[in-house]
Image (cartoon, grey):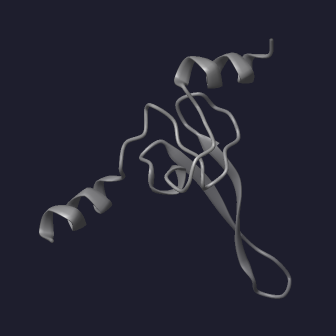
């Protein structure tokens, strides 16, 4: 079994609708192409170090701090 697969299993990683993109452990890089379109690349989980999709979630999900502040304000 690969290290990525073991990390995913230990972390309880699963594909379910959208939370990796608003997780405190989510990392990505912005890139601009020659036509001026801005996109994201290198979508990674900082805990396990593996590639993720923005619509994935795991058992160690934590909301980003700025999102927590918005929820408290409402």
**Residue at x-position 75% and y-position 83%:** 37
- In this rendering, the answer to whether 26 lies above or below 30 is above
Toward the viewer: 30 or 50? 50
Q: Residue 44: which quarter of the image?
A: top right
Q: Is residue 72 left or right of residue 66?
A: left
Residue 30 is situated, as x and y percent measured from the top left of the image, at 66, 66
The quarter of the image holding the C terminus is: bottom left
Q: Is residue 49 left or right of residue 67?
A: right
As drawn, which residue projects farthest toward the front?
16
Q: Residue 66: which quarter of the image?
A: bottom left
Q: Is residue 72 left or right of residue 12?
A: left
Q: Is residue 62 left or right of residue 54?
A: left
Residue 48 is situated, as x and y percent measured from the top left of the image, at 59, 28
As drawn, which residue projects farthest toward the left?
73
- In this rendering, the answer to whether 14 lies above or below 10 is below
As drawn, which residue projects farthest toward the right?
34
As drawn, which residue projects farthest toward the top?
1
- In this rendering, the answer to whether 47 lies above or below 33 is above
Report the label total: 0
Q: Residue 41: which quarter of the image?
A: bottom right
- In this rendering, the answer to whether 45 lies above or below 10 is below
Residue 25 is situated, as x and y percent measured from the top left of the image, at 47, 42
Toward the viewer: 23 or 9? 9
Residue 1 is situated, as x and y percent measured from the top left of the image, at 80, 11
């Amino acid at each position: 079994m690969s290290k990525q697969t073991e990390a995913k299993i230990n972390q309880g990683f699963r594909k379910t609708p959208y939370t990796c993109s608003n997780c405190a452990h989510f990392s990505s890089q912005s890139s601009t192409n020659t036509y001026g379109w801005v996109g994201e690349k290198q979508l990674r989980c900082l805990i396990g170090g593996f590639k993720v999709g923005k619509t994935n979630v795991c058992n160690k999900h934590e909301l980003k701090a700025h999102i927590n502040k918005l929820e408290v304000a409402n």
